[in-house]
Amino acid sequence: NPHREAQRRPPGPGDKAAGRSVMSSLARLATCNLNQWAMDFRGNLERIEASIREAKAAGCTFRTGPELEVTGYSCEDSFLEADTLAHAWESLAALLASDLTDGILCDIGMPVMHRNVSYNCRVVLLNRRVVGVRPKVCLANDGNYREMRYFTPWFIDPTSPGYGALEQYYLPRIVRELTGQRTVPIGIFAVAALDTALAFETCEELFTPLAPHIALSLDGVEIIANGSGSHHQLRKLQTRIDLVRGATAKAGGVYLYANQKGCDGGRLYFDGCAMAWVNGECVAQGSQFEGLDEVEVVVATVSLSDVRAFRASFIARSSQAASAASIPRVEVDFALTLPYADQLCSAPSRPSPPRLHSAMEEIALGPSGWLWDYLRRSGQRGYFLPLSGGADSSSTAALVAVMCQRVVEELGAGSERSRSRVLADVRRVTKRADYTPPDWRDLCGKVLVTCYMASEFSGAETRARAALLAEQIGCLHTSISIDGMRSAVCETFAAMEVHSGGVRSEAVRRRPEMKTKPRDYAELTQNLALQNIQARSRMVMAYFMAQLMPWATDGDETTAGGSLLVLGSANVDEALRGYYTKYDCSAADLNPIGGVNKRDLKAFLEWAGRERGIGVLARVADAPPSAELTGAEGAQLDEEDMGMSYDELAALGYCRKVERCGPLSTFLKLRDRWADGRALTPSIRARGAAAPVTFDEQVAQKVKDFYFYHAINRHKRAAPGY
């Protein structure tokens, strides 16, 4: 092929291929979703290696990966251990010792210590050598993130142009002996290839007002890679997409986004969606939740000529670029664009609108993926769920059912690698060496045990709904009565002896009674104690059954034993209000609905009943929420007990949690938002002559009630320790 031959020799005068090679503009680039696990150095390395192999097989010249992919993102205080840094360099040395980095520029996320300071870094590799180390400038340190507990932001002198000069990083011995390099640049730099310039952002930096991609693009960097560890939050992907679209629509350029996908050992679920954008258009997108493959490589062929034309035609941008500060370059003798002959038979990836899931799909797919990752890596036999037949526990059961549906779907339609991995996980979890689930309900029967924990106050309707739901999803369903446990606790209290304190033993009241409508504080105290002991008895019994049910039900197929993880069912609204018993359903190993409000849960139940073939969920969604601690469903209602409706609670929680309002700001906002003629529920704290009269007084009392209960119940979220 004469075009390939022209690439092998220096172009001569009049050589047509010479001019064409100068105009080469197509580059094939790879980003990825990786399901990494905190401190799983061997497994993480294997997944990184697999992603590089797939990128090379697709003809890519660059590969970027998630933030801290070598160690896993959620290592927490293990990032403070010298061992973690040492093992990270051992993993990087393994990459350099192989041929994986031959002919491909690789951007790897890992922690690095420089001058006794730990940084969250990107380490750039090419042809078995280290090109440089790029530390993170802006650390995520709010919400779920605590990066500044483990890392330090790279210091940028505000008086220096650009991002300052580079420093020299002294490589550890294990890498020096492989590469022959003693030092490499560390700092904010661009990789200057033979045909383009490429640079990096890391996760949070994209979200900041003065994001690095602005200065980088003005200085002529055409490709920007962002390795992220961004967790799933309902409707958050739209924000991510808007930021990447805005970055490339205004500044032009190629933007590659990589992310972790899955649960890496903590409470967060990373929702993938690796993507590639060019000049404000999405040209490639990976999955956010779909599939259970641990490695997903997203490849895009991009035209750098399109980037140059876009930027050059934007005169105001060019004026700013002409006087922009220069970013240090690290040169590499390597071309990112395809050989000219390959460009003749290639075309840029076509843009398409980014794919977004509905909110109900997000609720179904995010927590169910989190449940599967947690279960398969926990070494446990499955899940145990106290199933009351109400909205919260039924939502949790539905999420386990969706998990089982996805596992079976992956066994049928996943990649060969993924099918093999998932089947091995299924057999390891179920302790059945030859088991292949014939359908998702059969799998659900192996990994989920539910129990209707009845009391004298339980109703026939909730019992029937729980049994029907268990039947429709195929799980192992049981029932017990907790009345004996409650009676035993009361009898133990009645037999109490008083030995000191000046109180005569015979004067102590010993027989608390449940009152349907308590009239005073003394009766309310008795009611609360008798309600709470029911809820706590269920928790004690749940953990007891979770340990024993595999032993109790194992037959000829397996006698491997093991125990179950206990699932909780406390939604975010009730957690903010404090409307739950401490150490009841909130005291669980996992709570898959802990970040979902009641309104979204009800909508999810309706959606799952319709879309996932679990018809009884619509019946559950229509039922009025009830704790059934003083009476059956209808006799006791959550909204009456709380003194506020779930719609009101959601609005109050949104002001407190999302908009970060105090009581006064909440009142001012809700006075306007609720001024539509609605009737507010009566307060349980201001009654009779003290009841509010005007609309403003009613809103104010509702706000006072919410913040009062929010304050006095904060201890329920975590036991204070000195």
Image: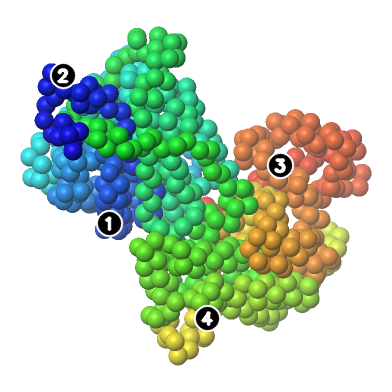
Name the element at disc 2: loop
Tell me the quarter of the picture where residue 165 sits.
top left
Q: Position of residue 414 (x, y in %)?
A: 43, 62
Q: Which residue is mark 3?
A: 652
Q: Considering the numbered disc 3 on the image, is that residue within a helix, a strand or a loop?
A: helix
Verify CB contact (< 8 Å) between mark 2 and mark 3.
no
Mark 2 or mark 3: which comes first in sequence?
2
Amino acid bearing label 2 = Gly
- Residue type at mark 1 is Glu
Q: Which mark is residue 549?
A: 4
Q: CB of mark 1 within 8 Å of CB of mark 3?
A: no
Q: Residue 640: image x %, image y %?
A: 81, 55
Whole-angstrom CA distance, mark 2 to mark 3, is 74 Å
Circles 1 and 2, Cβ within 8 Å, touching? The answer is: no
Report the residue at 71% width, 58% height from top.
606
Q: To which residue does mark 1 refer? A: 46
Q: Which label belongs to residue 140?
A: none
Q: Residue at x 71, y 34 (%)?
A: 666
Any part of residue 506 in sight: no
Amino acid found under the numbered disc labelled 4: Met
Q: Residues within 10 Å of mark 1 (few under 14, many from 20)?
A: some
**How far separated are the C-alphas under marks 1 and 2?**
48 Å
Q: Nearer the viewer, mark 4 or mark 1?
A: 1
The three-letter amino acid code for the residue at tag 3 is Leu
Q: CA distance from mark 1 to mark 3?
A: 47 Å
Earlier-in-chain disc, 4 versus 1: 1
At label 2, counting other C-alpha atoms closer than 10 Å, the crowd grade (few under 14, some 14-19, many 20 or more) is: few
The mark closer to the camera, 2 or 4, is: 2
What residue is pinned by disc 2?
Answer: 14
